[in-house]
Amino acid sequence: MSWNNITVGDLVESGEAEVKTGPFGTQLRASDYVEKGTPVINVRNIGFGSIRPDKLEYIPEEVVKRLSNHLLRKGDIVFGRKGAVERHVYIRSGQERWFQGSDCLRLRINSENSVLSKYLSFTFLTHEHQSWMMQQCSHGATMASLNQDIIKRISVRLPPIEKQRMIVDILSAYDDLIENNTRRIEILEEMARRLYEEWFVHFRFPGHEEVSFKESELGRIPEGWGIANLEEVVDLTMGQSPKSEFYNDRGEGLPFHQGVTDFGNYFPSNRLYCTVENRVAEEGDILFSVRAPVGRINISKEKIVIGRGVSALRSKAGHQVFLLSQLRKIFEEEDSIGNGAIFKAVTKKDMQTIKMLQPNVHYIESFESIAGPLWKQIRVLSDKNINLRGQRDLLLPKLVSGEIDVSDIPMPNDKEVEAA
């Protein structure tokens, strides 16, 4: 059976799909938001196929009931109306009955007899589609803007429904492996975080019952422990940006990071490179953002060049995992230091004078022996996910264009990924 070219508008005309704009500002006001309730997907929460959970907002049940026609269902596809026009979210079962924000558009497939919403979502992840969206939505110097008419003009090449299911199954298998690894990473990170807090925040370390306490600049701490300025325990390198003529995206030189643009949850991804080495971070160094958002933390996986928005930190005593845990706790809130002071940028002096708890070295080394292997496993799983995403992203455009036959593609598995 042949492939057909259709538009979203064709699906809307046939009743197989509908497009809906989010509630108007007069319907959903800033005063309607609450601390807990039904999550609202706004444009900042729209990623590439998945939700960005940072800074979710919530509305109460009475607002949900009043605007229930904006509740989302599994399989809905949500676009941002301004700025993030090339991105979209595919609504999964865990996000069913979340709420469509005012700055979003929703595409809903009413019948999956001829088209699968998940298949559409995968086609919307191709570079070809994203470039088209940016071209259609850009108007000179103004922010890119999306409307229903543009969504209806989106063209998709559709194979028979059986082929769509096979393509979705293959690509979803990659996503499932990535999601499983991500959950394992979160569990490992939580284990390391809880251990740190148990021992060095709540002071319930082994043998704590026999320890007396004393007052310090950071409050009550165990006898025999101390307080030091960061400069006493850390080798600190502040970034310095080379001239832009030394930047490239061809992989020449060392990876270059001058802010949080390419920071991940734990490790940065490389997009830019630099052929001069003004200031560098070594493998294992802690990367710390010194400009807003201050306090974002990643770990360098290799030698890199750092620009003026980033600093690199290394424990003088070799207690890198303890230092990582300590900094993550101090900077739990972006743009603030543990004492609550808000910063849009921090200087070298600001960094050097941060107060650091210095426990008995025995407890630091015991912590390192437990938490160190957890972070090594986080690195392994993160690398697996990079390989999985790379393989999926190579396959995706070839499968949805028909360049390769899905029947020839085996299901991915973890062992193959490790060998890749």
Image: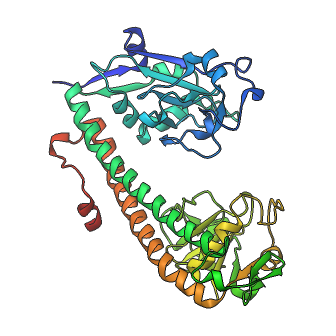
Identified at 18% across, 49% down, the residue is 410
305 in relation to 360, above or below: above
Q: Position of residue 193 (x, y in %)?
A: 57, 67
Q: Is residue 24 visible?
A: yes
Give how far across and how far down residue 162 sits, in percent.
20, 28
Q: Name which quarter of the figure residue 282 lies in.
A: bottom right
Residue 138 location, x and y as percent? 61, 32
Please tell me which residue lies in front, 264 or 262. Answer: 264
Q: Residue at x 74, y 79 (%)?
A: 356
Left or right: residue 355 compared with residue 393: right
Q: Quadrant of residue 259?
A: bottom right
- Please name whichever residue, 351 or 12, is drawn nearer the observer in this view of the structure: 351
- Vertically, is 119 above or below 241? above
Q: Is residue 106 left or right of residue 10?
A: right
Q: Quadrant where the C terminus lies?
A: bottom left
State which quadrant residue 416 falls in: bottom left
98 shown above or below 178: above
Residue 414 appears at what percent x and percent y? Answer: 27, 60
Query: Would residue 317 be seen by someone viewing this image from the given angle?
Result: no
Name the quarter where the N terminus is drawn: top left
At x 43%, y 55%, the residue is 183
